[in-house]
Amino acid sequence: MMFEGENNEALLKGGVKISSGLGFVDGCLIDTHFVKRGRFGRLAEAVVMNPTCIGIGLGEDTALLIKKGKDARCLGSGMVIIIDGNDVGHTNIAYAPVDSPLCIENLRVHVLCKGSGYNLEKRKFVPSIEDLKEEKKLI
């Protein structure tokens, strides 16, 4: 669980503090009021400190429905940001001084909107059924 983090978009070391969470979803770090409060930097830092975890940033008026602990679907009028640190290569998180910029190689980011999803087990984006129908029309 994240607390007392900075609310700016800067990716500076020390922008977030983490404690044990409520245990709703294993292997995930969840942040709320994500988009309007500019919390990308703090969730990215939390994921880089815990690269096996998946970061979930819930935008306003948006939810992420998770079924069977792995199949997630975005609901609502906003967006959900997924940050995956599983493939991070180089980062200076271990030795950068507090309040200094972080460098992160190969951080994966997915943006979900209504109907699109994400498989937490496979770490894979899932397009909405409506999007797949529209793509077929373009072919």
Image: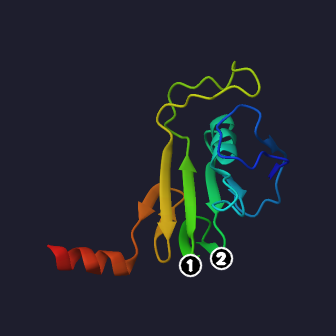
Please name the residue that numbered disc 2 is placed on.
61
The residue shown at (55%, 56%) is 82
Horizontal side of 25 relative to 130 (left or right) equals right
Label disc, if present, on residue 29 of the rendered structure:
none
Please name the residue that numbered disc 1 is placed on.
77
Q: Nearest the camera: 85 or 103?
A: 103
The residue shown at (70%, 47%) is 8
Q: Nearest the camera: 7 or 130?
A: 7
Q: Position of residue 131 (x, y in %)?
A: 34, 76
Residue 115, compared with residue 80, is above or below; it is below
Q: Position of residue 88 (x, y in %)?
A: 52, 34
Q: Are marks 2 and 1 in contact (CB under 8 Å)?
A: yes
Q: Position of residue 104 (x, y in %)?
A: 54, 31
Residue 121, compared with residue 68, is above or below; it is above
Q: Quadrant of residue 16?
A: top right
Query: Looking at the figure, which quarter contains the C terminus?
Result: bottom left
**What's the amino acid at mark 2?**
Asp
Give the residue furthest to the left.
139
